[in-house]
Image (cartoon, rainbow, N blue to C red):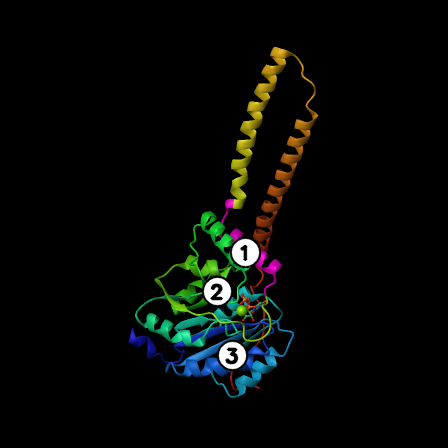
Amino acid sequence: MADRDQSSAAPVLSVVIPCYNEGENVPLLFGRLMPALHALGVSIEVICVNDGSSDDTLDRLRAVQRDEPTLRIVDLSRNFGKEKALSAGLAHTRGQAVVPMDADLQHPPEAIAPMLEKWREGWEVVCARRDARAGQSLKDRLFARGFYWVFDHLSDVRLPREVGDFRLMDRRVVETINAMPERSRFMKGIFAWVGFRQTEILYHQGERAAGISKFSPIKLLRFAFDGLTSFSNFPLRVWGVIGAAISTLAFCYILVRIIRTLVWGIDVPGYESILVSVLFLGGMQLLTLGIIGDYLGRVFDEVKGRPLFIVRRLYEPGEE
Ligand code: UDP
Ligand code: MG
């Protein structure tokens, strides 16, 4: 597939980097990223998405842009979250191969070379798989395991393990993703859902270069639930089965009571059993309503049809 390199206007490779309050990481990132990219010997573009940072990320990116004619900056109007920032970046790529990566150097830029190699062999998606989860606590590892287990059992999409957003995608894959209209962007799921011929390479994930992770435990939990409900209807459907089981049991119980009343006469009134079943069923109904509400909220979000993200300004190299 060597002919892919002889492109005219569009670069061969686009690298997309969502940045949220990564000011400190910007110089570290470009210090390592640019030599690795230039060593590839193909035409490149780097697209940094400033996801409404409140620090000096944008200024620092613009400073880098002054001597880096391959850097384009997409400045979003506010913080939209990583998934949407990534969608914004993908929408602005022009390259024939596209690599999304994090700004904190947890994704080594040196791993792009072997990915490009695989792409030239004809693979359409080259996932980068972590060889070990560096700097992760036991709690996080258990959480991740639990999430994958539940996701695998509830949805039709298989999420590859230890694979994040760091990957190489062919133009066709990116176009497909860009054309997906859904507002809830669980990128891990979307990447897996689109399919195409996929392969993997191994990489070693380092520690975050500077600053702290932008994902709090609550944000992570919300993210996991979002992912689950965007790729599975099981939480909606399961209540039908549980409801049917409970109704059957209740029906049997009523029969038993009727027979007992007919044979032995009226019993001591069973306040506890009534109270317990009312509370139990009430709780279940509220839970079900909550889950239906969550899906309904999602439908509402889709129906409103608001844009996924809002670009305040696109800074092309050489502009003032
Ligand atoms: N990020 C973003 N918007 C957000 C949160 C994070 O663009 O609202 C970016 C962040 O700047 C980084 C990447 O997403 O480039 C991954 O974030 P982080 O390193 O905090 O996540 P972790 O590695 O802990 O999963
Ligand atoms: Mg990180």
Q: Residue 230 at x, y = what percent?
A: 51, 53
Quadrant of the frame with the N terminus: bottom left
Can the viewer see residue 75?
Answer: yes
Question: Label 2 amino acid?
Answer: Arg
- Up-down relation of residue 175 to residue 234 (above or below): below
Nearer to us of marks 3 and 2 is 2
Gap in Å between the C-alphas at discs 3 and 2?
21 Å
- Determine the image quadrant of residue 283: top right
The tag on residue 224 is: 1
Q: Is residue 231 magenta?
A: yes
Tell me what residue is drawn at x 62 percent, y 73 percent.
53
Whether tag 3 and tag 1 are in contact, CB under 8 A, the answer is no
Gap in Å between the C-alphas at discs 2 and 1?
18 Å
> Mark 3 or 1 closer to N-term?
3
Q: Residue 257 at x, y = what percent?
A: 61, 19
Label 1 near ligand 1 (CB < 8 Å): no
- Up-down relation of residue 240 to residue 11 (above or below): above
Q: Is residue 94 magenta?
A: no
Question: Label 1 amino acid?
Answer: Ala
Tell me what residue is drawn at x 52 percent, y 55 percent.
142
